[in-house]
Amino acid sequence: MNVLPIDPLLAKPAPLICFSHLRWDFVLQRPQHLMSRFAQERPVWFWEEMIPTDHHLAYLEFHAFEGTSVQAIRPRVPARLSAEEAAQALSGLLDQLLAITGAHQPVLWFYTPQMWPIARHLRPAAVVYDCMDELSNFRFAPPDLQRNEAALLAAADVVFTGGYSLYEAKRHQHGNIHPFPSAVEAEHFGAARAMRCDPADQAGIPHPRLGYYGVIDERLDLDLLRDVAAARPDWHIVMVGPVAKLAPGDLPRAANIHWLGQKGYGELPAYLSGWDVALMPFAINEATRFISPTKTPEYLAGGRQVVSTPVRDVVRHYGDVEAVRIADDAAGFVQACEAALATGPGPWLDKVDRVLAEMSWDSTFAHMKRLLDGAQLVPLRAGVSG
């Protein structure tokens, strides 16, 4: 393959199209942290999953959101189309996006391999696969996901993983792969340490409060929550976040379990400030085998002790942190929460702050950008396939 070198001192940053299975305004997490930073230096389009429409033609919706210059793109595709026809329509819409924006040879950044087939015909400046989770282990995973991931890995110039366990599982599948576990905006969540005013829907909940925020799905051990609530009816468990892929009847109901629904990123420190202990009650299953939960450093930044089930990357990175306790069953979870309640704030905060100082999203972005810039010194290729 003939390639043309790029002079990084002369070239403007290439536009970036980020392909995501998560909607921009669902939950603020890794894609939003990184893409918002890239958007400060280059155009960024956030291509979301298609939405069926009764219209006879496929078309694009452009969505702008306050606080960022990232443009969310929501393809609308006629519901009558077959899967193959829908893929062809999406490829055509992607070509339209490039034509109307003038984004020649963009960086293609993928959070889902399922979108690789609609983009593989392009001439990108670089292809990035940021493998945040092992999606093939999730409930309702598409049957062709692993095949599409293999094709994406073959085409990618650089691969990132959302944690070290995921890196270890995939490091032999690519020659330029790098682990990037969850980072944190410590100042944002650190505000919880000084807050004294509860949100209205939490203010009436008695103490002690044990809290969780995040997506509520098959990755949580709902039986564990039910058992802890039954074992200690004087404790109140506060659950903040959207419910996904679960039926209402799947959620444990008790007088001391409070489901408060989804909250904005800016609201999370206020909820966190009102908890006595922060929880990570993850099930230990295939869906959690490789996760590196963002909430671990966020909880700690907020000055809250953490009780978690033995998620591999939590044990690896935080097992020796005094403020993080690990338990693998309801009895152990209750005991760990009791120890955390008895300890309260203390000298462990200083150690936590030293750990968090090396884990900012700014530093993660800077490191990823250097690797992306290095990848772009080679490509400008005639096309990729897979």
Image (cartoon, rainbow, N blue to C red):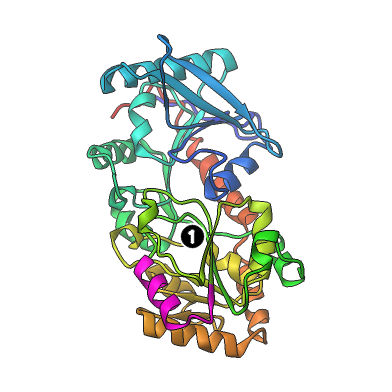
Residue 126 visible in the displayed image: yes
Q: Residues within 10 Å of mark 1 (few under 14, many from 20)?
A: many
Residue sitting at the far top: 56
74 horizontally vs 386: left or right: right
**Residue range corresponding to the magenta coloring:** 222-236
Instruction: State the residue in front, 168 or 225.
Output: 225
- For the C terminus, which image quadrant? top left
* Residue ID at (71%, 65%): 198
- For the N terminus, which image quadrant? top left
Residue 357 visible in the displayed image: no
Instruction: State the residue in front, 201 or 120.
Output: 201
Query: Which residue in the structure is indicated by mark 1?
Result: 181
Instruction: State the residue in front, 66 or 105.
Output: 66
* Residue 30 falls inside the magenta stretch: no
Quick one: SS at disc 1?
Answer: loop
Is 93 placed above or below 225 here?
A: above
Q: Where does the image place residue 47, in percent across and percent down from the top left?
A: 49, 30
Instruction: State the residue in front, 181 or 264.
Output: 264
* Residue ID at (68%, 69%): 273
* Residue ID at (45%, 87%): 335
85 horizontally vs 274: left or right: left
Is 81 placed above or below 158 here?
A: above
Q: Mark 1: which amino acid?
A: Pro
Residue sitting at the far front: 255
Q: Where does the image place residue 358, in percent across and percent down from the top left?
A: 61, 66
Q: Where does the image place residue 26, in percent across and percent down from the top left?
A: 53, 43
Q: Where does the image place residue 372, in percent across and percent down from the top left?
A: 52, 42
